[in-house]
Image: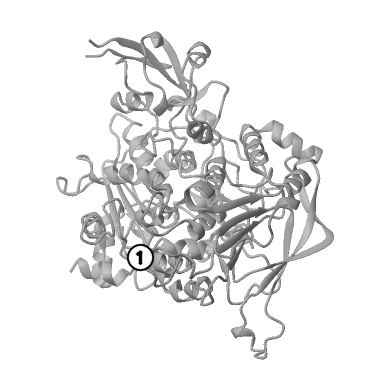
Amino acid sequence: MLCRSAIRFHSRVSHTSFTSNRIVPTATSAFRIAPLRCFSDQSTATSLSPSNPSFKVAIVGSGPSGFYTAKYLLKEVASTADNPLQCSIDILEKLPTPYGLVRSGVAPDHPDVKNVENEFAAILDSPLTSNDSSPNPPIQFYGNIKVGDPSTITLPELLELYDAVVLTYGCDSDRSLGIPGEELEGVHSAREFVSWYNGHPDYVHFTEVFGRYLKNATAKKQTRVVIVGQGNVALDCARILTKSVQDGKDSLFHTDITQHSLSVLGNNDDDDDDDNNTSGGGGVAVSIVGRRGHVQGSFTIKELRELTKMEKNHDCTFVVRDDELELGGSTPSSQVEVTDSRAKKRIDKLLRSVSTPTGAIDETESATKNSIHIRYLWNPISFNAPTDNNDNSQSQQSVKSVTFERTRLTGEPHAQTAVGTGEYTTLPADLVLKSIGYKGRPLPGLDELGVDSGDVSVFDERRGVIRNINGRVGVERLYVAGWIKRGPSGIIGTNITDARDTVASMLEDLPLLTSTNSNKLGRDGLLALLTERNVKVVDWNSWREINRVETDPGRRRSDSQPREKLVSVDDMLNILK
Amino acid sequence: FYNAKKTPQYEEIKVPVGINLLDVAHDYGLELEGACEGVCACATCHVVLPDEIYDTREEASEDEEDMLDMAFGLTDTSRLGCQIIVTEDMDGIVINVPSATRNFYVDGHVPVPH
């Protein structure tokens, strides 16, 4: 018997109100939009030219922002007019593999977060777009294409081939602290560590380096890792450094963490001992250090809660200090920040429920046990090399410790800054991971395209983003979405509204983008050019082949492991021969 | 099997009890994202329930509450659609889907330094 309920779904934004909800750009930095942009044009109807019935778009980057842009562009164009334009959208990707940070950023022990890949795959696999059934599907994927590399294809060449180009290539570099010792061996960015354990082909060579710092030849000697920064990436690194690697409940063994990483991380359990005897190796002591307090930290509660469960599941202590929670949380501004936000309130409550009085912390914890300490209100001042090292060559010096200055918070709510107090401490460190933010870089060829309006470049070097207004760049027919548009913030879902914002701009510009004078070659032109240049293009069917190999039971280390990734581009291309 | 009535403001649909709101949206072609496919690992299926329905649902799990912290446009009667099962007492209710296509800073915004 089926009972029925009538439910009304009320969506607050309908297509007719799409443009009326736009933010009107206020005065910005000196940045002139190319004259072709018409903010006054509120029409979403397409002026369809019979001689150019298609809308050809190239999207550079196949992470969430690229896929969501493709998805919503197709959807919105299809629903705008009685005779909608035929979309031809090509998602271009530098690697042979798609999905961006969903594949190379999301932690291996968060497999559910990667479920979004299924939705992205469905966009390419669906009957409407399937490579098998349609000769010219609306959306296509082409991997192993380095846009910006003249031996592949340059950005100007891409703009010649397509009506519009959307840059969604994210952020693949790091903010720097700008303190002494940052160039020492042993000082790395968390992004490098993450890319390495997730098997990004450009980072697998770090195995030797990380192996050296994490390995302890001396029995019962700890590896000390200092992580600077208070975001979820810092917490991901802490978990990966301390979770068990042997076959067992919640172990890294059953995740898609790469084999080369597992072998390095496993050194601290025990090197050659087969019967799980951990007395031979040292533990990993992780300190996650932030210059502000716990209320200002960027990590989210789900990830914090995971740390509170590390003792039970992985025999790893988790410590936050009472006095440091109090120090940061007791300023009137911090109290307002807590009251203002449901998320902060819950984080404050969680941390206070598990905190330890500083006096009760055993500073001489067992060297064989893993531990994660979160430290608040310490600003990093310098990375230090050993001073008694006879070899004075700078390039061979490895980090030994990190000096921090105690800070206190000052300022208005949501705008507090951390100022030094003159009190210092030093933490020993065998490995340092800087986790203070990814940073974007300009695509080669980008600045040369900039509007000739003076000295404002298209790329904002300070923020590491491409200057834009609602996704429109000051270059004809060029748009941005995702982290390279708004900076490295948010979660996967944040890219939904980001992409829709950019797509709305494109829709408004549609009459200009598809004018009769344009006669772009699009996909055909792209493939012809790449063939001419001998570029080995990895299309969607080829990715499916790579995927089949990675998920083959014979290759995986256990049945519950989702995949064992291929970590070399050559290996991937060799499969496709 | 079902009557779908579209108006400029909302769509009224008849749905069977027992399925969750995310599945309802997907099955009936309504606009609701579900990035993690309904396992409480994202906040994209966020819906706003009418007061009387919110008050009478089973309490959200810790996992759901954690994810709701990150939902855009969170309200006092917000839940994740994938965790709400259709029941008979939901007949005739209106469910709101917060959406924002215009919530981005214009470039030039300077984040407060710290």
In this view, the residue farthest toward the right is: A422
- A46 or A566, nearer to the observer: A566
Where, quadrant-wise, is the C terminus of chain A in this rendering? bottom left
- A20 or B31, nearer to the observer: B31
Tell me which residue sits at (45%, 69%) in the image: A267
Could you tell me which chain the residue with mark 1 belongs to?
A
Three-letter amino acid code of the residue under disc 1: Gln
Is residue A445 shown above or below A414?
Answer: below
Q: Residue A525: x percent and y percent?
A: 27, 60
SS for tag 1? helix
Tell me which residue sits at (52%, 58%) in the image: A237
| Residue topped by disc 1 | A259
Residue A350 in the figure: left or right of residue A514: right
Q: Residue A302: x percent and y percent?
A: 53, 41
| Colour scheme shown | one colour
- B38 or B104, nearer to the observer: B38
- A421 or A305, nearer to the observer: A305
Query: Visible in this render: residue A274?
Result: yes
Find residue A295 and report its image quarter.
top right
Tell me which residue sits at (55%, 30%) in the image: B73
Residue B79 in the figure: left or right of residue A395: left
